[in-house]
Amino acid sequence: MIKKPRVRFAPSPTGELHVGNARTALFNWMFARHSGGKFILRIEDTDESRSALSYQINLYEDLKWLGLNWDEGPHKQSERLDIYKEHLQKLIEKDLVYPCYCTEEELEDERQALILSKRMPRYMGKCKNLTADERKQRENEGRSPSFRFKVHPQVIEFEDLIRGAMKFEGEAIGDFIIVRSNGMPAYNFAVVIDDHLMAITNVIRGEDHLSNTALQMMLYRAFGFEPPVFAHHSLIFGKDRAKLSKRHGSVSVGEFRKQGILPEALMNYLGLLGSSFTEGREILSREEMIKDFSLERSSKSGAIFDEEKLHWLNAIYIRNCKTEDLVARLKPFLEQAGYKTDAINTKWLNEVIELIKTELTTLAEVGSHIDIFFDDKYKMTTEAKEILEKDSARQVVKTFAEYLKTSDDTPQKLYPAAIKDVKEKTNAKGKELFMPIRAALTGKVHGPELDKVFAILGKDATLKRLKYFTA
RNA sequence: GGUCCCAUCGUCUAGUGGUUAGGACGCUGGCCUCUCACGCCGGAAACCGGGGUUCAACUCCCCGUGGGACUACCA
């Protein structure tokens, strides 16, 4: 039997969940779900100064919102410190590490000196051959050491599932720190131990970790661990082809949520970005993406985040959303726009949303489309005013209102009959006929089909609005 | 500077030696229509450059060029 894959998503809780990280999570999740393997969540919170619990909570919420459910974890590195200590001990025993007493200032000076002499800035091994006495002396000075891994010049090779054969000349790498002077493990050290102990079979992560992989491979060798299979996907860029960051606009999952992007749309878009699905399909449900997922189809080159395409997808997901369901999702946005949803008749609201569904690109826009149905939100745009300045237009509105007032038609027949009547009495047709009514009725020159607007508004509300123009 | 990765329309991509280089977003022309949106039909738009290999290169190799990542006691 083939071992079921185990993959992990291992973010550090140092900020809002970035869409780039969300994409990495998505890839891992799809890989696990596609293969029937496990998706594990690990929190890399070894940087005490940058990690915050609030970000961690935020992260869980975002992942849940996206529907990226995990099978194990969250494992927190901050709770596994003993494990890293044990493993450091193992390497010390093998004489593969040494304590380094250099201060950050000293290291910075060394780096600057190397740069000045046009040499590669790297650690030159000052503390590598300290005698026991020298070490003792530094300890007595109150210095606590970091631990460095002894790097031997070597060629590192591995097979990347996305990029193929990778080869690194290890020469440029200096002895790197695996445990910091405060006792916390450094990234490359902790990942290797955790991935091994958690029996991770496939490491799927961003291309920014490609160089790190060489260091990690050395550690795998040092421990005698079997390395996992690596796959480094491309990064997401902003419009200027630099790594996507705050200055490019919205970049965190939370921001897109607040804008009224649907999680399905965001997942779909992220799955599409820097990748493709069978037969060029672009609109896929989670299930379809999982079924069709393949790392080999992941692009090697970076992809620019195209918010317009995201919006296009979002609009499609909104349109395809069942109206009842959409209304529920819309409620927070309506509240925010000043609508008291509790006070609105549900059946009526469903009808309204059904009508304006196709006009929405994001949920947050709902307020500016729905306002025409609320007396306290209804207001005249200047374009609408201009239309109603004409006498002929006012005549149309007046005739229309007159008919409504005096008619005893059934609600279904009322609107078509009224239009017919206005047509006959004023000779207006097409734009001349409908625009004045639209302008007076909705205060806008754009909007849903008038007969439907009328059906929702009803006779009384309509007459109330028309009163001003018929005086 | 060093190590490494990448390179098809503006953008996301399909393509795996022989194609009119396909699709999608966006842009644009038209249809539908009281308007907007939706929908439908059409259009413009790309193989970074130079050498090879080959009967034949977008496709394979090399060199440039360009972009990116890493180069921390961050992950």
Image: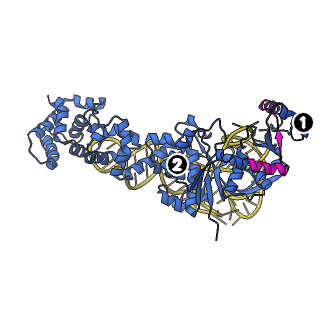
Q: Position of residue A108 (x, y in %)?
A: 78, 31
Residue A382 is marked as: none
Residue A106 part of the magenta segment: yes
Q: Chain of mark 2?
A: A
Where is residue A294, by image quadrant?
bottom right
Q: Position of residue B25 (x, y in %)?
A: 47, 47
Is A345 rendered above or below residue A197? above
User: Circle 2: is it few (<14), some (14-19), or many (20+) Cα within 10 Å?
Assistant: some
Where is residue A440, by image quadrant?
top left
On-image quarter of the N terminus of chain A: bottom right
Residue at image mark 1: A134
Colour of chain B, in one word, is yellow
Colour of chain A, in one word, is blue
| In-image side of A46 versus A123 (left or right) | left
Residue A63 is marked as: 2
Between B52 and A2, the one lying in front of the other is A2
Of callouts 2 and 1, which one flags the residue occurring earlier in the amino acid sequence?
A: 2
The amino acid beneath tag 1 is Glu
Is A367 rendered above or below residue A280? above
Q: CA distance from mark 2 to mark 1?
A: 50 Å
Residue at the (14%, 49%) spot, across then down:
A413
Helix, strand or loop for the magenta stretch, by majority:
helix
Residue A260 part of the magenta segment: no
Q: Which residue range is magenta in the image?
A: A85-109
